């Protein structure tokens, strides 16, 4: 083992013990890495979970048109979709906003109309059902999101009134259209507070009736086969679909939201890097003190034939070893805490505002986490480089010391 | 002097002290034969340590020549001197300068480690040297657990580790009591003689100086 590395190890672990300086410096880097990993994973988790929810409720690709899609255009679109080998399944939809009323209590949720038989192959709707069943659905029934059902005070089997914008149109023409009485056939829970607060699902025919669409639809949800490239398929569809029709990936349809999520994540990532920089500065300051404290030892090494660059290497190695140890421990602690994140969050919620209040103001019932390999690699490289560079300034100072002056120092 | 292990000729060294120039060494001529022991005495500020540093290649003379084993050391850069120093000479200091984080054996081995790898022969020699300086049983003790005399013995063993041709000892008994100092000097002279290593001993103590083969007195930057 080269003597600078040997001496660096001995100074960090004198006689097999771990020096106090080593513990403190390693802990600084460890905490920095842990916090960076946790924050980026949780932020990534929000983005990832939102992405999954969008895919589960919209499909991978959404086909929309400038105008309503009528029978002829629908036929053309379906022909193109059926001929695309990367597509697993597709189904038409119509969407809008309605007013629901139950026991004189009105709410204004968004509503999505599907052909349930076809949509089952595109969206895993059955997975989200907490009461009732999709098989109980007919053209006079709806499925409500869980918070919406709770707020209205309805359960499966209850009857509610649906008021559509078409009623306003009819009133303008001095015509009266009565609200539609529908049965609550089921309740679903996606796990996202916003979606669970105000979403209604119904059959496509009911939605077409409520909006006066006849047989027309607003678009198609498309699910791709596993491994298919979403962007490439969307581009291919754009070129083959009828004029005035767009094929947008779930990311594109929510581009602004995704950009905000990505921006927030990157900003937090950037701010978190300063934690590691502060820890690296603490290494610099401690190693500088070591250089001052060991001035005569440095002189001795020179007197024994140790080259200035080897003396510098000794201090650089200490920075590198502290960085590597701190990063390794930080990753271990970070992944451990991420594994038990929900327990930690629930504990904090219980000790602070309470579980109920916490969930009310929080978008997710559980703290999501999604760790990207690229982020972990960046954290490791950044942390180790910052720690090694932290050892460079003390190393440079040590290398500049002339042995004769160092030996003379008091 | 062909068999001189070290030779300095016309060495001058000045230091600036405010506006004044202090001539610390004024054309010093000095040589030590292989295996010879020489003592340097002189008052504080007479230039003993400066001469020792120049002989060790730690400092440069303002004028004059220095030969290490007939090699013109004054023509080498400080970096080149550093590269040769570990093999050519060993140093013993007043304050021992042991590395506190490593044990006695590792301190002795440090000289060999700086020159290259440490294998079984080096370990065996280090253990032998520790045995020779009377600390064979204390090889795994940290310097902080040793007395001043014991630390200086380890420093002696460390200086001899690479079988240098010359030992430069700068007041090695300065921090020791009289009896321990006497023991250390006797040991230093004995082991240098056994190893056939030349010794330059800087000391204030006339009794210690007398134990060397040749005694020199430095006064105002010149030998008298």
Image (spheres, coloured by chain):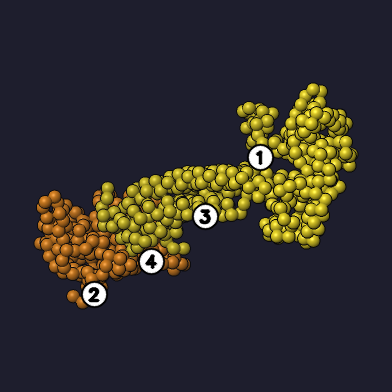
Chain colours: A yellow, B orange
Residue B129 % position (x, y): 38, 62
Residue B114 % position (x, y): 38, 63
Do the dots labelled 3 and 2 sit on one chain?
Answer: no
* Helix, strand or loop at mark 2: loop
Chain label for disc 1: A
Q: Looking at the rendering, which quadrant does residue B157 occupy?
A: bottom left
Q: Nearer the viewer, residue A79 or B213?
A: A79
Q: Identify the residue position indicated by label 2 in the image.
A: B70
Q: Nearer the viewer, residue B124 or A266?
A: A266
Q: Identify the residue position indicated by label 4 in the image.
A: B115
Return the disc, 4 or 2, that comes first in the chain's sequence.
Answer: 2
Q: Is A304 left, or right, of A283 in this rendering? A: left
Chain label for disc 2: B
Instruction: Decide: is A67 above or below B160.
Output: above
Q: Identify the residue position indicated by label 1 in the image.
A: A367
Chain label for disc 4: B
Query: Which class describes the residues within 10 Å of circle 4: few (<14), some (14-19), or many (20+)?
Result: some
| Residue B68 makes an appearance in the image | yes
Q: Measure the C-alpha gap from mark 1 to mark 3.
A: 27 Å
Q: Nearer the viewer, residue A146 or A260?
A: A260
Q: Is A205 left, or right, of B80 in this rendering? A: right
Closest to the camera, between mark 1 and mark 3, is 1
Closest to the camera, between mark 4 and mark 1, is 1
Instruction: Decide: is B61 above or below A95.
Output: below
């Amino acid at each position: 083992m080269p003597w600078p590395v040997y001496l660096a190890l001995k100074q960090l672990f004198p006689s097999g013990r771990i020096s106090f300086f080593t513990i403190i410096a390693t802990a600084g880097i460890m905490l920095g890495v842990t916090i960076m990993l946790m924050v980026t994973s949780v932020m990534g988790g929000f983005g990832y979970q939102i992405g999954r929810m969008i895919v589960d409720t919209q499909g991978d690709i959404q086909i929309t048109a400038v105008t309503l899609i009528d029978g002829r255009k629908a036929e053309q679109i379906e022909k193109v979709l059926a001929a695309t080998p990367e597509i697993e399944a597709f189904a038409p939809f119509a969407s809008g906003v309605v007013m629901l009323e139950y026991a004189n209590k009105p709410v204004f949720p968004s509503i999505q109309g599907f052909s349930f038989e076809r949509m089952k192959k595109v969206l895993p709707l059955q997975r989200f059902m907490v009461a009732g069943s999709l098989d109980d659905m007919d053209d006079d029934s709806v499925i409500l999101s869980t918070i919406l059902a709770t707020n209205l005070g309805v359960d499966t089997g209850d009857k509610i009134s649906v008021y559509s914008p078409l009623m306003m149109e009819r009133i303008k023409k001095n015509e009266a259209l009565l609200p539609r009485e529908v049965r609550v056939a089921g309740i679903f829970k996606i796990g996202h507070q916003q979606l669970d607060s105000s979403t209604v699902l119904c059959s496509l025919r009911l939605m077409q009736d409520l909006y006066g669409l006849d047989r027309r639809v607003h678009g198609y949800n498309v699910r791709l086969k596993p491994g298919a490239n979403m962007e490439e398929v969307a581009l291919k569809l754009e070129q083959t679909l009828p004029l005035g029709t767009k094929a947008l990936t779930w990311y594109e349809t929510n581009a602004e939201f995704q950009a905000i999520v990505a921006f927030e994540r990157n900003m937090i990532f950037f701010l978190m890097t300063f934690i590691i920089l502060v820890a690296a500065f603490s290494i610099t300051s401690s190693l500088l003190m070591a250089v001052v404290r060991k001035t005569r030892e440095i002189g001795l090494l020179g007197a024994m034939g140790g080259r200035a660059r080897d003396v510098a290497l000794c201090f650089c190695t200490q920075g590198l070893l502290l960085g590597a140890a701190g990063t390794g421990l930080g990753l271990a602690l970070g992944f451990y805490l991420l594994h038990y994140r929900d327990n930690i969050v629930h504990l904090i919620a219980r000790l602070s505002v309470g579980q109920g209040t916490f969930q009310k103001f929080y978008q997710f019932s559980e703290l999501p986490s999604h760790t990207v390999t690229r982020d972990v690699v960046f954290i490791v490289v950044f942390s180790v480089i910052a720690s090694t560079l932290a050892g460079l300034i003390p190393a440079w100072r040590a290398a500049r010391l002339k042995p004769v002056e160092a030996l003379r120092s008091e | 002097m062909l068999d001189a292990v070290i030779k300095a000729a016309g060495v001058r060294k000045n230091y600036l002290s405010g506006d004044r120039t202090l001539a610390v060494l004024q054309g010093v001529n000095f040589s030590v034969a292989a295996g010879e022991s020489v003592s340097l005495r002189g008052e504080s500020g007479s230039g003993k340590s400066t001469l020792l540093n120049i002989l060790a290649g730690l400092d440069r003379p303002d004028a004059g020549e220095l030969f290490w084993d007939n090699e013109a050391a004054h023509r080498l850069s400080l970096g080149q001197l550093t590269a040769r120093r570990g093999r050519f000479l060993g140093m013993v200091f007043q304050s021992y300068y042991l590395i506190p984080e490593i044990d006695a054996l590792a301190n002795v081995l440090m000289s060999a480690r700086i020159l290259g790898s440490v294998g079984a022969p080096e370990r065996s020699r280090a253990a032998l040297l520790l045995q020779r300086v009377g600390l064979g049983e204390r090889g795994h003790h940290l310097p902080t657990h040793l007395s001043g005399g014991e630390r200086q013995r380890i420093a002696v063993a460390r200086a001899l580790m690479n079988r240098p041709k010359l030992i430069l000892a700068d007041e090695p008994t300065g921090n020791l009591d009289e009896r321990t100092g006497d023991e250390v000097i006797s040991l230093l002279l004995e082991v240098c003689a056994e190893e056939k290593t030349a010794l330059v001993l800087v000391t204030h103590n006339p009794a210690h100086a007398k134990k060397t083969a040749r005694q020199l007195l430095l006064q105002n930057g010149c030998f008298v």
